[in-house]
Image: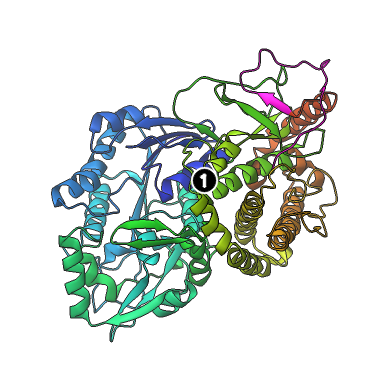
Amino acid sequence: MKVLVTGATGVYGRDLTDRLVRTGHEVVAMARRVPAALPVGVRFHQGDVSDGDAVEAAMAGCDVTAHLAWAVTPLKSEADTRRINVGGTENVLAAMARTGCRRLVFSSSVLCYGANPDNPPRFTETDERRPAADYLYGSHKKEVEDLILARGVDAVLARTAATVGRNIDNLLLDIFAAPAIIGVKGADIRYQLAHQDDVGRFLALACEGGPSGPVNVAPDDVMPLAEIARLLGKRYVELSHQQVMAAVRFMWKHDLADITPGEGAAISYLPKVDTTRLHDVWGFRCAWTTAESVVDLRRAVAGRVVVAKRRIDLPWRLRFPQGHTGGVSAVEHSPTGRPAALDPPGALDTPVDRRAPTYRAALSRPGPLRPLPLTLHLDLLRTAATGVINAFGTVAPSLAANAAGSFGHRLYLNEGVLDELGSATTLRRRLVAAGYPREVDRLAAAAGAALRWTADPRRLPDERLEAALAVLHDEAAWAWSVAATGATLDAALDGAFDALAIRSLDGSPFDGGAATVALPPDGRRRSWRALAERTAAGLARALVGAVGERAQRLAMAGIVEHRADVVDLTWSELLQPPAPDLLAALIERRRLDHERLRAVTLPATLSGAGPCPLDSTQMATTASRSTP
């Protein structure tokens, strides 16, 4: 199936694109701005949905269109907002008629119901929708829904709750990252919040099938705004309705906030929805509750505060490395190739820009890794590199995706990461050092919450197990980032990542990371670095336990023949395996490739501009010299 995703660089679009690719679909990603990277295999089409010709060109040959492009942040001009929201949808519908695209999945919103004082306790899909005319987000969602229904196309209208999670970077992040969260006196403000992972999972399901028509997508529970503020560690301030509206009008007029007066008036009466159709007709349940989604949101707001539309990264706080950088490819066109390694390369080796200078071994382990630990560790290394680069304030927009590579199915780290870290100012280093102990404590506390949630993976339903795998993966990446930040402060970046590496994912039984972590040999932060590494080891054990449970379920379902077969799947394939009729041959090819690579020894240092690749008869001539 070929799917066009409009708004592919937004919160919904990134998640949906990744899920569709994992499922084996062909994806065309359309957006106004070129992203730094996209999942491997995705074709990018730069364009604006307000340009009908661009939409039609992107949609050519597509079976399904997931229409996610929307002016989430309100524009000063109502006409410009309408041009994107309503005009863009008209272009999508016209292109569907001309190209023969058969199905539309539209990301609507519960805000199409309106925010009124006489709202019912819970809206069903058949209730009247009454958004205020000056609340453009909600009124445009209703207008576009009516437009789609009038055309009679096969369409799913996913009325999603306000969406949060560890990887959001939109208007909701600006609201919840503010110094204080504002409530309205006398108003019982309760939020029903969906997690981005659940929304992405539903949109992917709707692209593949299911009944047409509207459906509410949200968890069942709600949470008072004051409790949300408490969980986020924010000050909660209540003002009168008149004070709130006066402040909103002033900030909107002077371009100090992206909340319109119409949206400000809606704060007191946000709609809540009934999810019976989601459960009974679609057979879908959210893996995350509202409360859990708010806890996860703390990752996105950590180390960041928003004042008058300006996002400020606090230099003494470590930012959670958002997003998944593993399994991506650079979008911009640049010379690519492979550093001097193998010919032919390993099946999972990564192409890199030949202008990249040097890669050095990231682990002391000499042999190749199996596909599951290889792709997992690549992802962890790249995400951790993003976190460390963020900590020291260096700017390297394309470095994260190329921070680590697989050559001969061994892990290598780009020395450009070290170069970037070396450019950090003395003041920035002192600020990071001053806050480091507290940041390690925060890491341990957050990891503790994740470990409690995933303590017994056998009791988790499938959707919760998938969420647990994602959480543990991301928490492990954060732990790697924090440990590497401490090593950078102590100038101890000449050791390998062995202390953090997740053990025994390439064998059975699955038994997790190292049981103990010795204190680093030197540095003022040695005890805090050791705590970060112990936290990483605990997350590794939990992650391996969740992987083992996932493997067991795949074997019981007949998707893999044996539980241990999962070591020959990539991390993405573990979450969404290929079709069973293709899987056995894929696993066999991967095993043969692993045996071939075991017979090869690679040097500890590889150059992206090397004169020639090694073949299986060439051996390393120097001892391993590894970097974290």
Residue 622 shown left or right of residue 3 in the figure: right
Q: Residues within 10 Å of mark 1 (few under 14, many from 20)?
A: some
Residue 234's spot in the image, x, y percent? 43, 74
Whether residue 160 is visible to the viewer of this picture, yes or no, is: no
Secondary structure mostly seen in magenta is loop
Give me the residue at 22% from left, 75% from top: 244
- Could you tell me the amino acid type at mark 1? Ala
Q: Nearer the viewer, residue 399 or 592?
A: 399
Whether residue 538 is visible to the viewer of this picture, yes or no, is: yes
Residue 424 shown left or right of residue 84 in the figure: right
Highlighted range, magenta: 605-628
Residue 567 shown left or right of residue 83 in the figure: right
Give me the residue at 31% from left, 77% from top: 120
What residue sits right under mark 1 in the picture? Answer: 424
- Position of residue 47 relative to residue 66, above or below, is above
Residue 443's spot in the image, x, y percent? 61, 63
Give me the residue at 25% from left, 61% from top: 257
Q: Nearer the viewer, residue 560 or 187?
A: 187
The coloring applied to the image is: rainbow
Secondary structure of residue under mark 1: loop
Q: Is residue 610 magenta?
A: yes
Give me the residue at 71% from left, 25% from top: 346
Q: Quadrant of the C terminus?
A: top right
Residue 222: which quarter of the image?
A: bottom left
- Position of residue 246 relative to residue 550, above or below, is below
Q: Nearer the viewer, residue 469 or 492?
A: 492
Residue 191's spot in the image, x, y percent? 39, 72
